Image (cartoon, rainbow, N blue to C red):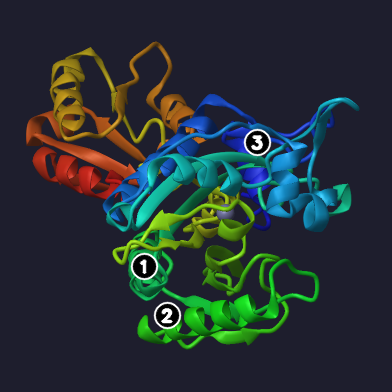
Amino acid sequence: MLAAADHRQIGQKLDLFHFQEAAPGMVFWHPRGFFALTELRNALARVAEADGFEQVQTPQILRQEVWEMSGHVQHYRDGMFAVGDEDCQAFVKPVSCPGHLEIFRRRAASYRDLPLRLAEFGLVHRGEPSGTLHGLFRLRQFTQDDGHVFCAEDQVESEVSRFCRSLRKCYSRLGFERVKVAFATRPAERAGSDASWDAAERMLASAARAASLSPEHAPGAGAFYGPKLEFSLEDHGGRSWQCGTIQLDLVLPERFDVSYMAASGRKSRPAMLHRAVLGSLERFLGILLEQSTLRLPPWLNQEQARLLPVAESELPLANEILAQLRSAGVRARLAVGPESLARRVRDAHADGVPFLFLLGQRELNARAVTLRAAGAERLVPIERAVEEVRDACAAPC
Ligand SMILES: [Zn+2]
C-alpha cells in the first residue's frame, strides 16, 4: 500500500500513464489510462448532447492575427507556444474560442439560430512554468471539455441556469456533492470598455441569482474578456478543486465582429458564454484516482470483471457467466491457465480489475460465485452477482 494517495504513483502502479523529461507537463497515456480518459470523454459528450450542444473540432494552430483579434497576444502571450517563422507567425491554441467564433460567423445568421451551442474536446497547450507542473493536476497539454453558447442577451439568464442545473447533476453523479461557487469580476488587465463590463457583470450576477446560487465574491479574478462563475469540488480529504466555469463575454463577439439578424430586423451582437464542466479531463482523472483510494472507479476500467475458474470442470459455467456479464454491458474476461488460483488473483489485483468471480466445486454445486471486490469475499447466486456488478460498473452519466 502507498502511504498517501498520490495519483502519479497510482498511475505507474496500474500502468495508466507516465511522464518523462522529453515532454514536461505532457502525458504518455498507456492503453488502460487512455481507455479511462476516453470513457470520461464519452460520458461528458453525452452530458453536452443532453444539454443541446453539438460537437465540433477546430484547428490546433492558428495564425497570429487571430490571437491578436481575440486579445490573447496582448493578454496571454506568455501562456502560448509559438510556431512558424518571421513571415508567418502562429500559435498552438490555449483555448478553442476563436475557432468557435469562426463557426458561428458562418452558421448563425438569424435569431432563429440562437442559442447556438458548440462543444469541443479541445487539446490545448499552455506554457505553464516548469516549477508549477504537478502530475495530471497541472499540465502543459490537456483536454478541455470546452463549449460556447452564442445567444441573445435576453437568453443569458436561462442559459446560465440550464448550465448550473446540469453541472450539479453531473458532479453529484460523479460522486461530488459539495460544490462551492465564486463570482469572479473584472481583472486589472482586461479587454473591453467599462460600460460593457458593467453590463456583463450585472447580467451574470442576475443569472446567478436566477439559478439560486449564492457565490462568494472573487474581485479581479475574471477572464480578460469577461466575468465568470467558478465551481469548485470538495474531495473526501476536504481539498477543493476548481473545475467548472461559465463566463459571460461581450468582448470577443465585438472584436471578431460577429452578428445575427434580430427579430426586429436589426443587426445585433450575440452574447457569448464560455463553459466547461470539468475544465481538464486529465486533471479530473487525477482527482478521481486520489479520491477513490488507489484505483480507478469501476466504470473507467478497461477490464471490469475477471472470471477465475479453479479447474477445467468449472470452465463451462465460467463461460456461461462470461456471456451473461458481457450481454449486461460489463467488460469481462476469463483467466484460465497453468498458474495457481492464488497467483491469478494476485495478477488480477495488480491489473486493477475491480471484480473477481472465483469458481470452484462449491460454487458449481450451488450455482453461485465467490465475488471478490474491495478486499472482501462472499458467496453470491450467479444472477445476483451479475446484476450487482452491472450496476456498479455502469457509467454515471
Ligand atoms: Zn472560450
Label 1 vs 3, first from the N-terminus: 3
328 vs 223: above or below: above
Q: State the separation of the CA atoms marked 2 and 1.
A: 9 Å
- Mark 1 → mark 3, Cα distance in angstroms: 41 Å
Mark 1 secondary-structure assignment: helix
Task: Identify the residue at the far right of this view.
Answer: 86
Disc 2 designates what residue?
Answer: 207
Viewer-nearest residue: 319 or 341: 319
Dot 2 and dot 1 residues touching (CB under 8 Å): yes
Going by the numbered disc 1, the residue's amino acid type is: Glu
Q: Position of residue 298 (x, y in %)?
A: 38, 44
Image coords of residue 349 (percent x, y): 47, 36
* Residue for badge 3: 12
Choose between 158 and 316: the one closer to the eye: 158
**Residue depicted at 58% across the width and 70% down the height:** 237
Ligand 1, seen in the image, is in the quarter at: bottom right
Q: Are marks 1 and 3 in contact (CB under 8 Å)?
A: no
Image depth: mark 2 or mark 3 in front = 2
Question: What mark, if any, has residue 159 been given in the picture?
Answer: 1
**How far apart are the two marked residues, 2 and 3, measured between alpha carbons?**
44 Å
Q: Is residue 215 above or below residue 342?
A: below
Residue 184 shown left or right of residue 352 in the figure: right
Percent x, y of residue 156: 40, 71
Classify mark 3: residues with Cα within 10 Å, few (<14), some (14-19) or many (20+). Answer: some
Q: Is mark 2 within 8 Å of ligand 1?
A: no
Of pointers 2 and 1, the one earlier in the residue sequence: 1
Check disc 3 and report its element: helix, strand or loop: helix
What's the residue type where badge 3 is placed?
Gln
Three-letter code, disc 2 = Ala
